[in-house]
Image (spheres, rainbow, N blue to C red):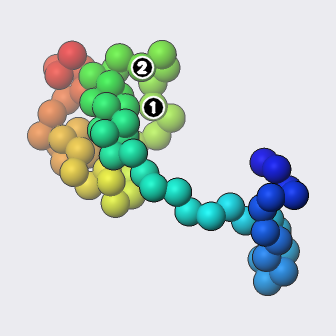
Amino acid sequence: MNHQSSPYDPDLEMFVEPSCVLDMAHLRSLRWLAERELLEHRPVGAPSGAFAARSAVADGRVDARAAA
């Protein structure tokens, strides 16, 4: 991270970066690969968060091994 271009937040006592727009198509493709165990490595943990709520594996509708 470039500290000269990032603003310093004295309340947090750290440099902060502005929010960026999420590429939902990229996230969906990564989730698709993870659900089918086609990534280079297994996911570290179970799906969590707002975006994982729509996942078929998180909902229990699809077994990751059976989907491959």
Q: Is residue 40 left or right of residue 68?
A: right
Which residue position is annotated with label 2?
Answer: 39
Residue at horizontal 37 percent and vertical 36 percent from the top: 26
Q: Is residue 31 above or below residue 48?
A: above
Residue at horizontal 42 percent and vertical 20 percent from the top: 39
Q: Is residue 5 above or below residue 7?
A: above
- Categorize mark 2 by other alpha carbons within 10 Å: few (<14), some (14-19), many (20+): few
Quadrant in the picture for residue 35 = top left
Q: Give the camera-side residue of 66 and 6.
A: 6
Q: Is residue 54 left or right of residue 48?
A: left
Give the x, y percent position of residue 37: 34, 20
- Kind of residue sitting beneath label 1: Pro
Residue at horizontal 78 percent and vertical 48 percent from the top: 1
**Inter-mark Cα distance, 1 to 2:** 8 Å
Mark yes or no: residue 35 visible. no
Quadrant in the picture for residue 53 = bottom left
User: Looking at the image, which residue sits at the far front?
Assistant: 5
Mark yes or no: residue 33 visible. yes
